[in-house]
Image: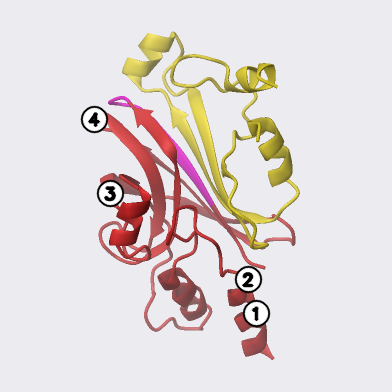
Chain colours: A red, B yellow
Amino acid sequence: MLIRIIWFGLLGWALNGVFGTATVVTNKGKAMFADRLRTSPGTYTTSPKFCAMGTGATTAARTAVAADTALSTEVESRTSGTESSVTTTQTGDTYQVVGTISATATRAVDEAGLFDAVTAGNMFSSATFPVINLANGDSVQFTHKVQQT
Amino acid sequence: MPEHKQAAEMLTRPCNEVVARVLAGPETAARLGVAVGTVIEARHTITPLDGSAPLGRVISPDEADVVDTFGRDVLAASQEAN
């Protein structure tokens, strides 16, 4: 029964992408979710709390890279976000990470992601959005929410 | 669709989302005449779980005083356009 519940939960995460092949919860993210439910996770032993941002998230760019591996062009260092469980529909049904990244140069940011490591690692989720033009010193506070249904 | 209507629609559908709030650094704060750290822009990217198309950009409904990078009041501009 538990397996069936988890399976249907994962089906609920079969999401449309914002751009082409981009998905909000990546294939790695789905595997991460399943693995980290175990008493002792076998593969994904760190939570996906590291926030990243990137540039160049055109449809072509998103097709050219593995959407569940990396952002198109990651810029700036990742930040370790603050995790919590929040409520979207059912009590505590949403995983939330909040993190702020500062620009050290002029940036045209159009994508963001969550990873399980401060460098490299596995991408749990990604999102694209219209370009945000940042001046040197501006920062972006990202709030990622992933709801389980 | 007008952005404030998108925001209203967003509230009726469960979704995964990323909200990006841009905070002014020293250079931008001086240009806009606001304090460093002021939220100057907000983007909301969401993907509905019901299979319908992503809504794309939505102005965060809780950012009533958001201004864009040119110092305009985003919500007021959106409402005037409609």
Identify the element where label 2 is drawn: loop
Q: Chain of mark 3?
A: A
In the rendered image, the quadrant that contains the N terminus of chain A is: bottom right
Q: CA distance from mark 4 to mark 3?
A: 13 Å
Give the magenta range: A135-144
Q: Is residue A12 magenta?
A: no
Q: Residues within 10 Å of mark 4 (few under 14, many from 20)?
A: few
Q: Chain of mark 1?
A: A
Identify the element where label 4 is drawn: loop
Which tag is nearer the camera, tag 1 or tag 4? 1
Q: Are marks 1 and 2 in contact (CB under 8 Å)?
A: yes
Q: CA distance from mark 1 to mark 2?
A: 6 Å
Q: Chain of mark 2?
A: A
Q: x and y percent of residue A64 in the render?
A: 28, 60
Question: On the image, numbered disc 1 is attached to which residue?
Answer: A8
Residues at discs 2 and 4 both on one chain: yes
Q: Residue furthest bottom?
A: A1
Q: Is residue A59 above or below residue A16?
A: above
Q: Earlier in the sequence, mark 2 or mark 4?
A: 2
Question: On the image, numbered disc 3 is attached to which residue?
Answer: A74
Q: Amino acid at mark 2?
A: Gly
At x 58%, y 21%, the residue is B74
